[in-house]
Image: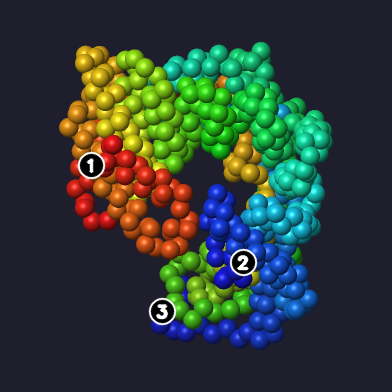
Amino acid sequence: MALQGVEQTILRDPALFYWILFPISIVMILTGILRHYATILMNNPPKPATSPADSRERQGLLRGVNLRNNGSVLYKESFDTRKSYLVSAFQNGEFLKDPESRGQPPANPMTDPAGMEAMMGMMKGNMMMMIPQTLIMSWINAFFSGFVILKLPFPLTIRFKSMLQSGVMTRDLDVRWVSSLSWYFLNLFGLQSVFGFILGSDNAANHMSQQMASMNPGAGVNPFQPGQDPNKLYLSEAENLEVMEHFCILDGIEDRILHNLASKKAY
Amino acid sequence: MTAATADPYALDHSNLIATLRFSQQAPLILGQKQAAPDSDSIFSATHTRDDPAKYGTIEQLFFSCLQTGDDESAHKCLDQLTQRFGPSNERIQGLRGLYEEAISGKPVDLEECLRKHNDALSENPMNIPILKRRISLLRSLARPAEAIGGLVELLKAVPTDAESWCELADLYRSQGMTSQAVFCLEEALLIVPNAWNVHARLGELLYTSACSSEGDSSCRVLEKSIRYFCRSVELCDDYLRGLYGLALATSPFSESKHASDLVQESTPALGSGIISKDTFAKLNAFATEKLDNIVQHRSLNHQLWEVEQAELIAAKALLDRIKNPA
């Protein structure tokens, strides 16, 4: 165990500082920027609906949700007709793209081209994270493993040893010494704000292309995950609608008006 | 730039004066855009991320120029937008369609536009901007039945578009199909539950239908309309149109209708009580007073007067009518 109160001194070549600390930091920053732009490049926006039936299937559910959330603006009779219509339509699958295939197990996402695409998108995102990390880590392991490259100016508890000194197998070394591999990890997790500073806010670059994408926002968004059965969602929405209590916001509105507004004379 | 385009999104295209003023700034705004790149090439090279507000402004300017007949500037706007977003962008296609419709004078040209729209739609049946252009073109060609059919199809595919529901309501109203129009506005309300103008519009529709129909149901419809007017005033407490409707619907002219049907109040089918005569009078007093206030206040303010001249004059006429029911 390290002696308490005694300053450990390690004689370091100052070149370590310039040839390890800086290269690691710079490489990390550059990969971060590269990854950002690669993500933008490979990111494909969600596909808008291609046919009216497709769009109908996507947005029909929202109608039920809207009725559930905002039903209070309607009178009871209007609400009830809508409710019974939507419930029966949801249950009969009227909004589905192909009502015949209702009840069948969802298509295998591996064979469904749309599902395949979404999975490819996820894969691409994951790969974008994994490949550079693996490369850089093996690079650091191959070239700089075992170097102690900097000393923190403040003391830390022993728990930080595994975080700051990975790759250095010395039991008695003071926790304040940081190894090269740990410096890599610190950079990996700590550079978010630096990227924010360099690249502007995180998605500033791909903001513009979305602006003109669609007239009504949310039109292109597919609420269904690939492989999810829309029919099940519709059935559960029908259930939600059935159990819902209706209240009308217009009940007693004239008294509310008179009470709240008419009493305030000042205009 | 900030002074020239104070807030392009706040521009109301039914306000002709503001539209005219805005479109008169066209050379200024468009000139700026062209001067910008060569004035500071390094800066513009590093700063390729263009701000979204700029293109929003150009789009608004495009509409204003078309409205005021400045087709040349409108074309320039369209060119700039096309340059940025490419001719295959759906929204750009919609704008181009609008431009072509606007510059075509003869009905034959409009037919040609319609054919173009149909062609574009056969390529991509979900091209929403073009779908909407086609419907409004049908409407301006005085073919409301086809326009309604198109809108119904559109709404089947996109049932969450409040704008289309309102347009359909307006079309139905123009054909005298009030109950369908009411249904459409109710759908629109479900999507935008806090839109006071839609509330007031619904109130107006119900009021007209109550006035035109006779019998026991008209009283109930009138009450519905009063409640919608109330809601719109509750949501926006100096909304002129809502107050106007409230004052009109509770005015003595319609009170006679209300009173004549009051005898049948034994059927509380609404689930809510029937508005009592006392409340009726109070509501009317409140609405007239507030309306009076607003009319006086806004008439003094030159800018406001300019903007809402027509509405203020109408409100004044109504007030006079209520005060001296000669």
- Type of residue at label 1? Ala
Kindly tell me whether residue B229 is visible in this rendering: yes
Identify which residue, B136 or B32, lies in the foreground: B136
User: Which residue is rendered at x = 33% and y = 33% of the image?
Assistant: B249
All told, the count of numbered labels is: 3
Q: Residues within 10 Å of mark 1 (few under 14, many from 20)?
A: some
Q: Chain of mark 3?
A: A
**Residue picked out by circle 3:** A4
Kindly tell me whether residue A58 is visible in this rendering: no
Whether B237 is drawn above or below B133: the answer is below
**Residue picked out by circle 1:** B285
Q: Chain of mark 2?
A: A
Marks 1, 2: nearer the viewer = 1
User: Which residue is rendered at x = 74% and y = 60% of the image?
Assistant: B73
- Type of residue at label 2? Gly
**Residue picked out by circle 2:** A200
The colour scheme used to paint the residues is rainbow
User: Which residue is rendered at x = 46% and y = 53% of the image?
Assistant: B309
What kind of element bears circle 1?
helix
Q: Chain of mark 1?
A: B
Q: Residues within 10 Å of mark 3 (few under 14, many from 20)?
A: few
Pointers 1 and 3 within a single chain: no
